[in-house]
Image (cartoon, helix red, strand yellow):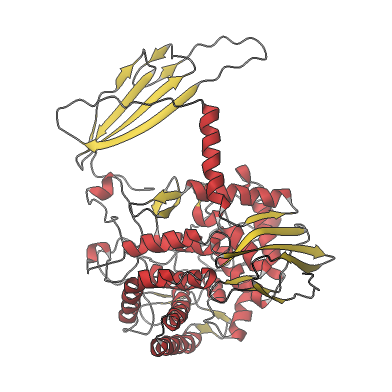
Amino acid sequence: MRGYQPKARGQFLAPIVEPEKGAVTLSYDGLDGQRMSTGIRFSGQTPDTLTGDNAGFKLALAPLTSKQLEIGVNTRRETAVAGTPPAPVDVQRSGTFEQQFENAEKQFNAWTDSAARITTGDAHFNSILNRAWRVLYMLRHPMPNGQDAIDAGVPWFAAPFGRDDLITAFQMLPFKPEMARGVLKVLAENQGTKYDPSRAQKVGKIMHELRMGEIARTGELPFDPYYGTVDATPLWLMLVGRYVQATGDTSLVKELQPNIDAALKYLDEEVKANGYLQYGGESGAFLSNQGWKDSGDAIANSKGERAKAPITLAEPQGYLYAAWREAAKLAELSGDSEKATDLRAKAEALKERFNKDFWMPDKNYAALAIDGKGNVVDSISSNPGHLLFTGILTAENAFAVHDRMMQPDMNSGFGFRTLASSEQAYKPFGYHLGTVWPHDVTMALYGMHDLRPGVSSGVMMDLADAAASYPNNELPELMGGYPRALTKEPVPYPVACPDQAWAAGSMFQALAANLGLHADGVSNELLIFKPTVPQKLGEVRLEGFPVGDKRVDLYFRNDNGNTSVHYNNPDGVRIKLVPNDATPTS
């Protein structure tokens, strides 16, 4: 955990060195009574020197020749028995490295076989997507219920996070919907069942973070799991609805109905105080900020002053609006029209209230938050960008947010800053005070396309340009917020996770937005709304794009600035196309 030093450590045991095998076992007895051991085995050549600290090799190489060494690693966790020495960890050598690599590739390919296959006319863009698939595959976290959660990122966040998992699954929903199914079930299984303020747990609440290491197992930190998040519960409900809509998997509604009801009841209780979701003002909270911008200084007004708790953030209200509307659709599928009507009424009342309370007429923009004294936190931030796909803003206000985000103080040239550079609290390296987060950018793009098709495609290609300056064409967790005109390429944030789930999913979300893809597996329909293919991409091919349990092949092409659409539709999906100044060909 970045920035945290454990209060105490367990005992490191003497290494077991087996020179004849070229093997070493390192063991540690944790404070939780667990013994954790790591076995290391060298093959290809036995080390000339081998200790518990290092392995040394002497190699004689003729010109233009090579020698291959292999290192195998295996781990074991068991109950520690005080005073007993550890046993060696056996590291079996089952096949050569090349054979193991080939086997790993087969497993990866089997995982991606169920997803839509995406290729574009730009090799660099294809490389971004290919790398992102591998990152998402690597970050899968198998859980005891047989489903995969998603680790948020490595090295700092190698654990499932409710918000991160839900947003990543949402990003990937058009192309690999089974990721969403797994995340929804994992989070349902860890849904709050009691009131526990030490873990911010409440009945029906969706968790924030689940750690499974020694610090969590001893209870030193309350992460087994921790529930301090204001937005995971509405995001979970929203994703249930959108997953069912895209896939037609109504069986999941029946399976999760108790969880859906518990989440709705929890949300009703939370909004009783002031009509909104809020957080803070309680002693002992581990996180002072509980939206996605959860650093301590993230919520600041135009004077640079930190907001005082309790805090009512903007974007969770949009998620709540979308959650109630999606829950209404699920209620209709279950035959409960009265419940559906009630949920829609609550959503519309929230929309009216929000556009009155959060809108800043003098800035023609939505406030970042409302503080504990009822004052708007009036800084210009990226948070309102998330509102664009939820539908909570009036049409007039949505266009105003769109246009304001495209101004130079918000748009760095590599994506939107978390805080406008014109604000007092702006720092180009402030974790949430001016940096650029790929997922934050594409959450906005997902709603921006429907407002002004074509504008969002330019921002998507800016992100693609940013990826070119990183190893493997991979977008990191976040980047510095310096203007592109000044730096020419993004300035890396020093301790950003190089592999971050929602950064990997961001380009898929941007692509789905710009192609205008809206699958309806319940009705066997695919809406393609004003698709836009940037000139640099030239074309986009989607093979096996899922609509419910059916598949369709789609081909989008930039024809002299317009986008044409061709498709192969053997399963008979009903395709509705709203063209973007283009004449489609089927």
Residue 535: quarter of image: bottom right
Residue 539 in view here:
yes
- From this view, report whether residue 371 is shown above or below residue 487: below
Q: Position of residue 323 (x, y in %)?
A: 44, 77
Residue 308 in view here:
no
Q: Quadrant of the C terminus?
A: bottom right
Residue 471: quarter of image: top right
Closest to the observer: 441 or 573? 573
Closest to the observer: 414 or 21? 21
**Drawn side of residue 263 relative to residue 217, left or right:** right
Q: Position of residue 211 (x, y in %)?
A: 33, 51
Q: Position of residue 349 (x, y in %)?
A: 44, 89
- From this view, report whether residue 90 is shown above or below residue 47: below
**Drawn side of residue 32 relative to residue 419, left or right:** left
- From this view, report whether residue 279 is shown above or below residue 158: below
- From this view, report whether residue 500 is shown above or below residue 374: above
**Drawn side of residue 230 relative to residue 386, left or right:** left
Q: Position of residue 15 (x, y in %)?
A: 29, 23
**Drawn side of residue 420 relative to residue 81, left or right:** right
Count of marks placed on residues? 0
Question: Residue sitting at 43 percent across and 25 percent down?
Answer: 93
Question: Residue sitting at 42 percent across and 67 percent down?
Answer: 291
- Direction right: furthest residue: 560
Question: Residue sitting at 51 percent across and 32 percent down?
Answer: 100
